[in-house]
Image: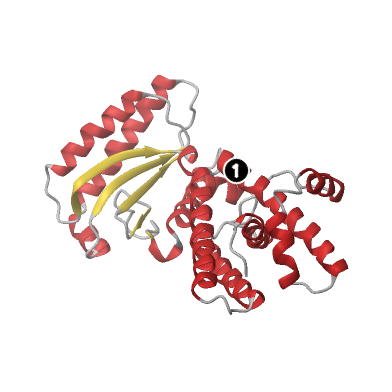
Amino acid sequence: MIENKDTDPKAFERYFKDIVKLHYSPANYRDVPDNQGGDCGIECYTLAGHAFQCYLPEQISDIKKLVAAQKDKINKDLKKFRDNTKKLEKLFGSTKICRWILATSAHKSAEITAFCAQKSLEIRELNLNYVASDFEVLIHTEADYRLEVEALSKQAYQLNIDFEKNTAQKVEIWIDQNLTFLNNLDRKLPKVVGDEAQRQRTKSTLVHKYLDYQNLLNRLLQDWADIYEVVITAVQNRQEYLETRFLTAPELLPNEVIKAELQKLDDDLSREVITLKRTDIELIKFGVVADWLIRCPLDF
């Protein structure tokens, strides 16, 4: 986490720019340094047309003073955004700005929301070349970027998913209590693992992965619902494809097919959810295999 971000305006600016960069990805982020000639009312923008101006108020406890300070900041910077037309046309190129966002440390009044709506209409009426027809002035805080804040707070762009891990004893108890549920697994394992003793060890390992995977999914659903949806979609796509391959080509070797689909799932998750830790991706992969072996009625 950036030091002194709560008291140092420049530290807060660097911190919120990191949030924006993480949210939109560096390839879609454009910095606007103010070292030469001012920032024209923005400090960074994205290729999605979202422009950001950072502001750390002196205090946030007195709501009336906070709102007055934020209104003043919005007025001053929107004037720069409105008046520096030549500079901004050159800066934005073909990008149309549809959102001007005050990135600040607190949003405590509906009055400032209404003020932003009024300013949105005023800017639209100017018909500036670099402003989109659906232009809006917004106010955002850290609370609007919970995943990014969590990632930055860990000093790395990764999620810290705190879920319950199962012990070997819990796994064995669960197996004893769910023998019927595990019939599919018992039927399929001999076709993957030849040795009986190895099959029992593999069964325990797979059930362990399955239970931890379920706990991980529950934690994602509880704390990061958007990430949960992405993971579930990726998993379902791979499981459906896996089942289709065995339906259409039953002669395929299970080990080779599962290995190939695991790699594709790894690629999907690494691309779609860049904040997942490598250890969590590995657990998801083997949890998916265990889930498929346990639940899918297809024989192979």
| Residue type, mark 1 in image | Asn
What residue is drawn where x is 59% and y is 79%? 252
The percent coordinates of residue 99 (x first, y second) are 29, 47
What residue is drawn where x is 59% and y is 58%? 296
Q: Is residue 168 visible?
A: yes
Q: Is residue 161 visible?
A: no
The answer to which quarter of the image holds residue 110 is top left
Colouring style = secondary structure
> Which part of the image, by quadrant, shows the C terminus?
bottom right
On the picture, is 168 further left or further right than 30? right
Residue that carries the numbered disc 1 in the rendered image? 4
User: How many numbered marks, from 0 up?
Assistant: 1
The percent coordinates of residue 33 (x first, y second) are 40, 59
The answer to which quarter of the image holds residue 108 is top left
Out of 41 and 143, give the one closest to the viewer: 143
On the picture, is 8 further left or further right than 192? left
The answer to which quarter of the image holds residue 89 is bottom left
On the picture, is 181 further left or further right than 274? right
Mark 1 element type: loop
The percent coordinates of residue 111 (x first, y second) are 32, 24
